[in-house]
């Protein structure tokens, strides 16, 4: 029996034998394609070839593409678990011809591989072709129909024609398109899941699970114009896709994809963790949970590896929804603690061979998943209760709809994505009022917007702005240019002048010297903020006016120099001189050092390190990256040393603009989720010129300004390493002037300490060590001394017991303690409990201007519903604080010692009320 790995390799080897080049899968999070959330077909990475934007590198290619179908045009999320063959994540095996072979070879080879190499009985296979569409003037694909019986052994009655919905592929409203031909397999009559549907007959495309699609061959031969006309393409393409999971199930003789070796290890391990058994039945609630979890963990591993992070929007929200669904299904298997992250290594075991990236980033992925599980786990159980109440209400209503307010509350307070609520509703044959839900969401968005402060960016549209030539930013710090616009926050002025005097004539021509305005020039050498690098500061001067720039931003392709008019008046059209301040040099050092840092981090910590964001300013640099745990001091030291070594070697930098594909081939690092055009700039460190890019040890996509060689950086020091969210670390570091200032300050501190402690600087460490030791010893002695005075506290407590009120056998011991600390007060409560047998105790005391309340209950009272935690929670607000604890003992701290007596009074009331009721 073939393993999935053998099947995948078999596919690729087969097409290699037909002169295809193997091309690795593109990332599941597409780089630089905002039109697509996730890769959903093998053709995604070749889209630009089909529309004629770039030439193909090879005429024939084959691969196994990572696909995720959970959003947009293809969304199979609802199918997952309910059927045996739709997944969110799956691998699409594909072969392509870029204006090389066409239908005959595509059909013949698919058939050969399925029936000859993989030995599927030809009798079980069916083919479909496009039957034409009159309304759309699409001709039927007689060519493919004829070829099927000509180049394969299939019989004519098993080649069926279908309409546009099933057998015509279009990329969008316009563009390349063409008929397709699918191969389906008959899994046998027992697989039909529509036996109860009146009039149902099992056949291809009838919706039942007996016939499933294995492989789709698309023949791209037309171009649809914006008038809707179909024109034949001069270059024709073949684009095919076959689901690995479906083929694996067939070749392994399994009834369900989940029974194949791509899923069973995950299901088995889930079974080990949860103690539940998987029985492979459709319609079983537990089995369904197993399938959903096995499916979802694969999606999570691949999407997070490729750069998606759970969040509240876009890609991140898709990932969050998948994870929260999986958590909810975990409850069906009795899992109330995080456990999904434990499945990561199993997925890596199954698929790490074919996709090395998931092995490299496994720890990081686990960390991210676990932290999401923890945070959702906090509200999930309570959310399920809320849902159950809402569902009960809906069941009683006539229209069986869960109201939108409930759905919104579940979303807003308990983190339930709408589709999770809908899914849970469907399980009970209920619907959700999504219209009201959306209305409430809109209202919330409006509220959020209203709460935002005045926008810091200009609010006018890009249409009003001209493009600025800013190419000189890479090589000069000053230019002579012409002012072509001046802007305030409302818009742009194309004519006239602007000044701090009042002599400008018509329209707005006066500004105050403290108002933020922007000047637009026909060309500039200013770097506008982007890619983490701050915008340049500087000045614009003419013969009679002076403008200080404190922020440079880019809107569209226009560079806006924001700042203040210090003196005089500028006219539109006037010649000026723009000068970037020296800060720029410091920024360059920090930027080049950031690249060195990223390289060194990958060298020391491995490929888990991927950039998440950065700040590069004149003052310091900050670099955020994925890594599952805190790097050790030793590792950080090594990183620092590596960067310093490269600085000391004084290596050259070369920046080149080149086609994106070429840069990717060079292995230049891109930022996840960043949008790149077809031309990119690559910054290569260690390469003396454009021809020697291969020599570079660091190559990054980057539009920033850099040093000419690493020696200019001068020095490097990491000043801070911290965690900023699950799996994401942040390093802050200094170079150049920032570093000098840092050392100066550090040395001043050392001098000051030496003077204070009266020892030379070399002896400081020993001296401070000694002081700490002494201090510890003294504290210990103090604590021991305090313990003796603890007997006073006990005496006070005993007095409270003697004077206390009693209800039946129960002593109600409430009162204040003088001069005590929490440890002693706790001991007092324990002592009182033992002495009184049945007691409700609440003590209050003041320490260091803070109020503390302490409550204790004996077990007999807890049984009556009197819990220390409840009492403390109820009275803590009185002392302006909070707290809680166990039923036996609880504690609260607050800022109002004056209110201790009030709180104690309230406690007495509550306790008596409870005991007397
Ligand atoms: P179906 O009708 O079964 O949903 P499809 O028409 O959406 O399939 P295509 O878009 O043509 O499928 O994708 C090509 C191949 O990818 C299919 O023939 C199938 O083998 C596989 N495939 C598609 N969607 C999924 C999925 N959700 N899970 C697993 N395999 C899939
Ligand atoms: Mg589909």
Image (tube, rainbow, N blue to C red):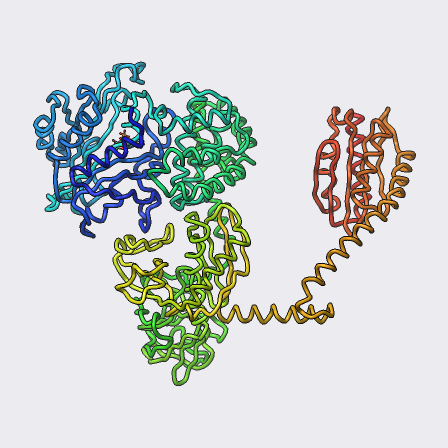
- Quadrant for the C terminus, please: top right
Residue 348 quadrant: top left
Q: Is residue 733 above or below residue 382?
A: below
Residue 109 appearing in the image: yes
* Image position of 875 (left or right of 707): right
Residue 69 quadrant: top left
* Image position of 837 (left or right of 298): right
Q: Residue 78's spot in the image, x, y percent? A: 37, 30
The residue depicted at 53 percent of the width and 49 percent of the height is: 630
Between 873 and 94, the one nearer to me in the picture: 94
Residue 391 appearing in the image: no
Residue 741 quadrant: bottom right
Between 468 and 459, the one nearer to me in the picture: 468
- Quadrant for the N terminus, please: top left
Q: Residue 546's spot in the image, x, y percent? A: 43, 80
Q: Is residue 663 above or below residue 15?
A: below
Quadrant position of ligand 1: top left
Between 503 and 270, the one nearer to me in the picture: 270
Q: Residue 715's spot in the image, x, y percent? A: 48, 68
The residue depicted at 52 percent of the width and 34 percent of the height is: 338
User: How many dots with numbers?
Assistant: 0
Between 383 and 671, the one nearer to me in the picture: 671
Residue farthest to the bottom, as pictured: 543
Q: Residue 595's spot in the image, x, y percent? A: 41, 60
The residue depicted at 74 percent of the width and 24 percent of the height is: 863
* Image position of 406 (left or right of 664): right
């Amino acid at each position: 029996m073939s393993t999935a790995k053998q099947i995948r390799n078999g596919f690729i080897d087969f097409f290699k034998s037909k002169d295809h080049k193997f091309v690795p899968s593109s990332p599941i999070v597409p780089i630089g394609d905002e039109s697509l959330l996730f890769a959903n077909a093998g053709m995604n990475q070749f889209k630009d070839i089909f529309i004629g934007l770039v030439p193909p590198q090879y005429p024939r290619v084959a691969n196994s593409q990572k696909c995720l179908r959970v959003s947009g045009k293809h969304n199979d999320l609802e199918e997952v678990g309910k059927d045996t063959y739709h997944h969110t994540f799956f691998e699409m095996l594909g072969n392509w011809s870029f204006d090389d072979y066409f239908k005959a070879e595509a059909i013949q080879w698919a058939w050969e591989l399925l029936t000859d190499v993989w030995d599927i009985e030809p009798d079980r296979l069916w083919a479909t072709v496009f039957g034409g569409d009159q309304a759309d003037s699409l001709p039927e694909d007689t060519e493919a129909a004829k070829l099927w019986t000509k180049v394969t052994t299939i019989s004519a009655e098993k080649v069926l024609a279908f309409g546009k919905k099933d057998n015509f592929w279009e990329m969008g409203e316009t563009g390349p398109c063409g008929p397709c031909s699918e191969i389906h397999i008959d899994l046998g009559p027992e697989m039909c899941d529509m036996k109860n549907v009146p009039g149902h007959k099992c056949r291809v495309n009838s919706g039942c699970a007996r016939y499933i699609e294995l492989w789709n061959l698309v023949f791209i031969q037309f171009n649809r114009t914006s008038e809707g006309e179909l024109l034949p393409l001069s270059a024709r393409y073949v684009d095919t896709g076959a689901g690995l999971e479906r083929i694996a199930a067939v070749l392994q003789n399994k009834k369900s994809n989940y029974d194949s070796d791509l899923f069973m290890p995950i299901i088995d391990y889930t079974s080990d963790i949860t103690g539940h058994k998987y029985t492979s039945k459709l319609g079983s609630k537990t089995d369904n949970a197993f399938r959903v979890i096995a499916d979802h963990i694969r999606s999570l591993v691949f999407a997070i590896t490729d750069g998606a992070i759970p969040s509240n929007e876009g890609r991140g929200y898709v990932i969050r929804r998948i994870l929260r669904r999986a958590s909810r299904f975990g409850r069906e298997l009795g899992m109330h603690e995080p456990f999904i992250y434990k499945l990561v290594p199993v997925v890596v075991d199954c698929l790490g061979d074919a996709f090395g990236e998931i092995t490299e980033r496994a720890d990081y992925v686990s960390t991210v998943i676990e932290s999401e599980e923890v945070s959702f786990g906090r509200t999930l159980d309570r959310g399920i209760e809320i849902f159950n109440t809402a569902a009960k209400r809906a069941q009683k209503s006539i229209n069986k709809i869960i109201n939108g307010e409930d759905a919104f509350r579940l979303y807003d307070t308990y983190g339930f994505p709408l589709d999770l609520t809908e899914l849970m509703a469907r399980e009970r044959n209920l619907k959700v009022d999504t219209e009201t839900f959306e209305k409430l969401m809109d209202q919330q968005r409006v509220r959020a917007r209203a709460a935002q402060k005045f926008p810091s960016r200009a609010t006018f549209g890009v249409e009003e702005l001209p493009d600025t030539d800013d190419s000189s930013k890479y090589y000069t710090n000053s230019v002579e240019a012409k002012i072509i616009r001046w802007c305030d926050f409302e818009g742009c002025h194309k004519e006239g002048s602007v000044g701090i005097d009042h002599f400008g004539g018509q329209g707005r021509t006066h500004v105050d010297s403290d108002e933020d305005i922007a000047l637009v020039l026909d060309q500039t050498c200013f770097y506008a903020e982007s890619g983490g690098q701050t915008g340049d500061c500087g000045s614009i001067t003419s013969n009679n006016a002076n403008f200080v720039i404190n922020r440079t931003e880019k809107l569209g392709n226009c560079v806006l120099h924001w700042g203040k008019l210090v003196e005089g008046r500028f006219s539109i059209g006037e010649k000026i001189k723009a000068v970037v301040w020296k800060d720029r040099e410091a920024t360059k050092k920090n930027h080049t050092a950031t690249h060195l840092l990223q390289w060194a981090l990958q060298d020391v910590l491995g490929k888990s390190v991927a950039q998440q964001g950065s700040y590069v300013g004149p003052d310091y640099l900050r670099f955020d990256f994925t890594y599952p745990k805190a790097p050790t001091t030793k590792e950080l030291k090594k990183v620092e040393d590596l960067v310093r070594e490269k600085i000391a070697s004084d290596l050259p930098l070369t920046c080149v603009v080149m086609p994106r594909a070429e840069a990717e081939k060079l292995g230049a690092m891109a930022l996840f989720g960043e949008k790149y055009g077809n031309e990119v700039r690559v910054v290569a460190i260690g390469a003396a010129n454009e021809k020697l890019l291969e020599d570079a040890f660091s190559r990054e996509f980057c539009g920033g300004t850099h040093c000419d060689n690493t020696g200019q950086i001068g020095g490097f020091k990491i000043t801070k390493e911290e965690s900023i969210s699950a799996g994401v670390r942040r390093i802050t570091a200094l170079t150049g002037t920032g570093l000098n200032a840092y050392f100066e300050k550090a040395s001043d501190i050392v001098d000051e300490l030496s003077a204070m402690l009266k020892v030379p600087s070399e002896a400081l460490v020993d001296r401070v060590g000694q002081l700490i030791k002494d201090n510890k010893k003294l504290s210990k002695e103090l604590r021991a001394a305090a313990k003796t005075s603890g007997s006073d506290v006990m005496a006070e407590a005993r007095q409270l017991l003697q004077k206390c009120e009693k209800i039946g056998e129960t002593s109600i011991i409430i009162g204040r303690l003088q001069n005590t600390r929490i440890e002693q007060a706790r001991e007092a409560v324990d002592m009182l409990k033992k002495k009184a047998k049945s007691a409700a105790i609440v003590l209050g005391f003041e320490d260091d201007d803070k109020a503390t309340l302490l409550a204790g209950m004996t077990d007999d009272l807890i049984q009556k519903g009197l819990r220390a935690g409840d009492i403390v929670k109820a009275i803590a607000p009185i002392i302006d604080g909070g707290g809680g604890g166990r039923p036996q003992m609880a504690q609260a701290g607050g800022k109002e010692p004056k209110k201790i007596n009030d709180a104690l009074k309230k406690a007495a009331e509550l306790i008596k009320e409870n005991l007397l009721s």
